[in-house]
């Protein structure tokens, strides 16, 4: 004999949800709709787990004019800046707390892209002080900045210098006065010998050495879109004929990815990307270049401000990123502190 249900109670085919009675067969549909809805919500991380948590961001100093972070000192106490006051770009240094601002170069020309040598004794920078059309590479001692040394002979345009980790070489982009019009070169500092690594019309440099000195990250639009690539470096051999070397594409996105900076342990590359709608700082795991095949690394977005954040530079201890942001309405140096989420 079947039990009789109380008057006003729902049939067994219904379940009680708050004040509503819902048919049981609707419940799976509701769950599926909720899951699908969640999949379309914006998520800060598209991989399994983020590599880093940003534990703090702050402007280092409020300065007149525009200034871009270009390099850390090897001891992690100072930053090199390119700074524009009254229309002239010059090389400056500053303590990481915003104090002891020092101007190293002077003039109405363009001195920029300063990079500290690994021993901390010199900076290499680009300057058009001799010829406005053909900027050269120069060396400067921050203790004696009045006597910079010219590194290159003025036979083309020299951009984006980057020291090798051992301090023996400087990689840079070179634009000759004639075809092929764009080259990736490496200069041996001791004797000024040059190796042409690539003659590539679609190279767009912005170079970063891997900490072991065996690879370079750089910007290129060889796929039709600006992406970050990695070149495995052959042994240094002076000459104008490019040697064979392996290339690997790191980023894959319809946006513009640029400004690579390798972490001191070689595991990550920070970069600028506008894939989120404006320029932000991102980080991606560096691939194992020796592997026959590897899954495509998933980048993590680090900054999320509606202003533009760009030019990340990893601190020597790997715990911070200096970057440039126009959050105040002008370009200023900022500092981000990172905490590893997973190893």
Image: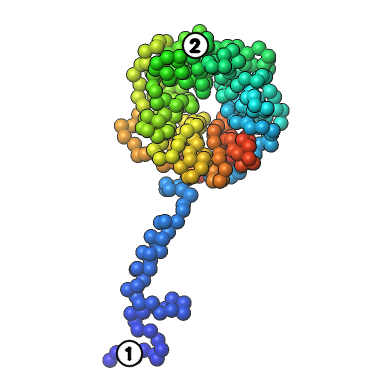
**Colour mapping used in the image:** rainbow
Residue linked to disc 1:
3
Discs 2/1, front = 2
Tell me the SS state at disc 1: loop
In the picture provided, is 216 more to the left or to the right than 243?
right
Is the residue 176 above or below the residue 341 in the image? above
The quadrant of the rendering that contains the N terminus is bottom left
* Picture residue at 42% right of the left edge, 46% below the top: 47
Tell me the SS state at disc 2: loop
Front residue (pair 220, 13): 220
* Picture residue at 62% right of the left edge, 20% below the top: 109
Instruction: Look at the image and tell me whether residue 137 can be seen.
Output: no
* Picture residue at 36% right of the left edge, 27% below the top: 247
Residue linked to disc 2:
155
The percent coordinates of residue 220 (x first, y second) are 42, 29
Mark 2–mark 1 Cα distance, whole angstroms, equals 99 Å
The percent coordinates of residue 334 (x first, y second) are 62, 37
Instruction: Look at the image and tell me whether residue 101 can be seen.
Output: yes
Give the total of numbered labels: 2
* Picture residue at 32% right of the left edge, 73% below the top: 25
In the picture provided, is 243 more to the left or to the right than 281?
left
């Amino acid at each position: 004999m079947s039990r009789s249900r109380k008057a006003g109670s729902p049939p067994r085919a219904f379940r009680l949800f708050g004040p509503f009675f819902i048919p049981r067969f609707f419940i799976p549909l509701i769950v599926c709709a909720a899951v699908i809805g969640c999949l379309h919500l914006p998520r800060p991380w598209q991989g399994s787990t983020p590599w880093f948590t940003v534990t703090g961001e702050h402007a280092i100093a409020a300065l007149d004019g525009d200034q871009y972070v270009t390099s850390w000192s090897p001891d992690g106490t100072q930053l090199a800046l390119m700074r524009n006051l009254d229309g002239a770009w010059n090389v400056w240094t500053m303590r990481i707390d915003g104090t002891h601002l020092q101007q190293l170069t002077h003039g109405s020309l363009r001195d920029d892209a300063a990079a500290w040598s690994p021993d901390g004794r010199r900076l290499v920078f680009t300057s058009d002080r001799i010829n406005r059309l053909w900027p050269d590479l120069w060396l400067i001692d921050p203790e004696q900045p009045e006597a910079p040394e010219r590194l290159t002979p003025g036979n083309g345009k020299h951009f984006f210098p980057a020291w090798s980790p051992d301090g023996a070489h400087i990689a840079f982009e070179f634009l000759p006065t004639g075809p092929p019009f764009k080259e990736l070169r490496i200069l041996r500092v001791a004797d000024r010998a040059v190796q042409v690594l690539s003659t590539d019309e679609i190279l767009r440099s912005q170079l970063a050495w891997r900490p072991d000195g065996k690879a370079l990250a750089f910007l290129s639009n060889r796929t039709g879109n600006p992406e970050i690539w990695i070149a495995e470096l052959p042994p240094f051999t002076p000459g104008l004929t490019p040697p064979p070397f392996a290339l690997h594409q790191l980023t894959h996105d319809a946006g513009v990815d640029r400004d690579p900076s390798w972490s001191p342990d070689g595991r990550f590359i920070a970069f600028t990307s506008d894939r989120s709608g404006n320029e932000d700082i991102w980080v991606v795991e560096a691939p194992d270049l020796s592997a026959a095949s590897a899954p495509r690394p998933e980048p993590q977005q680090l900054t999320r401000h509606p202003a533009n954040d760009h030019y990340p530079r990893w601190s020597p201890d790997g715990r911070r990123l200096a970057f440039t942001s126009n959050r105040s309405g002008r370009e200023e140096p900022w500092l981000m502190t990172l905490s590893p989420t997973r190893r």
